[in-house]
Amino acid sequence: MKCKIVLNNDFKIGDVDPRIYSGFIEHLGRAVYEGIYEPGHPEADEEGFRSDVINLVRELDMPLTRYPGGNFVSGYNWEDGVGPRDSRPVRLDLAWKALEPNSFGTNEFMNWCKKARTSPIMAVNLGTRGPAEAQALVEYCNHPGGTHWSDLRHSHGWQKPHDVKLWCLGNEMDGPWQTGHKTAVEYGRVAAESAKMMRWTDPSIELVACGSSHPGMPEFGQWEATVLEHTYDLVDYMSIHRYYGNQNDQTPGFLAMSDEMDRFIKNTVAACDFARAKLKKKKRIMLSFDEWNVWFHSHGSNANSPDWSFARPILEDVYTMEDALLVGSLLITLMNNADRVKIACLAQTVNVIAPIMTRKGGGAWRQTIFYPFSLSSANGRGTVLRQSVESPSYETVFGTATDGKPEKLEGVPYLTSSAVIDPKSGETTLFAVNRSLDKELELTVELQNIEATKILGWSVLHNSNLKAVNTESVEAVKPCEVSGAALRKGKLTLKLSPASWNMIRLGA
Ligand code: AHR
């Protein structure tokens, strides 16, 4: 099958905000305990942080890491996790039916971020708590000293402020599963008052309001508009979340879901811009896609771990080759929405629906989805070009997303792609996924007004077994460098293997 892309350096979508390659660590399952923090592990440093995990997180090069949740944050007392460890309380975590010992908290997270070369996005609890506690946390983290909460930080051993620049006003507040679930008006009001007090405490911070938990939510669209009626001038970003699954083993439909992500983004932008028009505002609200990933393998597996236990091994999806194809395609969609999506967090980072897995007392390894993420993060920074794409297409039914109903889809292109020019190096990088499970795509890329005379590399992620997984000892899915592409007189030609993720780097 033949397909074609035309690129022209004059036609741009926007600059990639590197923060779209961010991650997420929640107090959930073995993400914190046995994930990033395991005192006594042979790789643990003096603070109990696993250095093997830190090295893998550095490879992912995540500018931000969201913390401490997720659903967890909506019942969290941040004060439980600071100060001397032996006086921190053990609590029931209602969100995940687990025991929370609080031996890891805000200050430990800040230290871990520095070591992992990431920066925090902190979420505040607007489920069971409100503006006063959110303000106190900003004061604890960001105020230099001489006040109750900043002096408490000093007394805990952290003299310098943590200077946290980004804050989420709660988590998935539209969801009935959320501790302290709210209506749009209830949430809009509490978010506005919290935002005011947090900004008064530190005017340099940026704030993310909670959008819909997924596009199937009954109030999707209206929720965003109502929340913004209360918060428009006080927030910078609207959050969106989305998880994808292949429960019915309908791989063509599953692989089409990056197109559904595109529609979700554009619909959320429309809802935010509706509020902008109605409220007669100049500012545009940007999107923070602060939870996204494949999540379905572990559904129903919680029964294997008793409720109210510590570090329950839950949500431990083991990812396949086809999951890596979708994650690569979702990253392509994020790049192609660079004008409005400024933050995106792969949910999550370690053990819990994560690119990195660990064994208690044992190794740490890269899941299949690690690779499209790390390579996109390393090479997908710069200016995204608008593409003109011709590709044969197929008809399918979307795989079943977390919210359910299969949907018939026509005209899904076999090729999904993005093109990024790095203004510093002048390199052009093309990301391309062939969604056909059995046919090669013969791709021609016409490069107009782009300085590219040589192929610097072509990385391919492919395994003919779409269900292949990586384990602690075997890496069945990893990228390899291939040859066979040609670049002549501004025309790149290459053949994309069926069911493959590709990254082609071109230089002047
Ligand atoms: O990432 C797992 C969970 O998914 C998060 O806690 C929640 O925000 C979402 O529903």
Image (cartoon, rainbow, N blue to C red):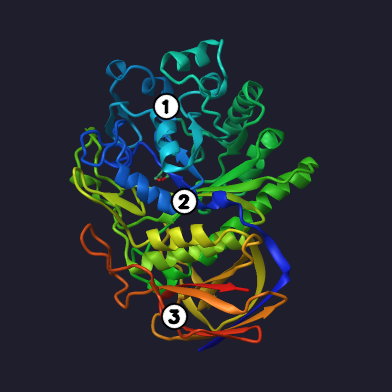
Observer-nearest residue: 123 or 166? 166
Q: Secondary structure at mark 2?
A: loop
- N-terminal of the two: label 2 or label 1? 2
Frontmost of labels 2 and 3 is 2
Pinpoint residue 27: horizontal percent, then vertical percent: 35, 36
Q: Secondary structure at mark 3?
A: loop
Q: Which residue is mark 1?
A: 107
Pinpoint residue 157: horizontal percent, then vertical percent: 42, 18
- Say whether residue 403 is visible: no
Q: Specify the quadrant of the image occupied by residue 325.
A: bottom left
> Which amino acid is tagged 2?
Asp
Q: Which residue is mark 2?
A: 61
Q: Is residue 453 above or below residue 418?
A: below
Labelled disc at residue 87: none
> Which amino acid is tagged 1?
Asn
Q: Specify the quadrant of the image occupied by residue 142.
A: top right
Cβ(mark 1) to ligand 1 < 8 Å?
Answer: no
Pinpoint residue 479: horizontal percent, then vertical percent: 38, 69
Within-10-Å neighbours for mark 2: few <14, some 14–19, many 20+: many
**At 28% from the left edge and 23% from the top edge, which residue is drawn?**
90
Per the model, the C-alpha gap separating discs 2 and 3 is: 30 Å
Q: Is residue 114 left or right of residue 261?
A: left
Q: Is residue 356 left or right of residue 417?
A: left
> Which amino acid is tagged 3?
Ser
Observer-nearest residue: 245 or 61? 61
Within-10-Å neighbours for mark 1: few <14, some 14–19, many 20+: some
Q: Which residue is mark 3?
A: 436
- N-terminal of the two: label 2 or label 3? 2
- N-terminal of the two: label 3 or label 1? 1
The C terminus - image quarter: bottom right
**At 29% from the left edge and 41% from the top edge, which residue is drawn?**
50
Cβ(mark 2) to ligand 1 < 8 Å?
Answer: no
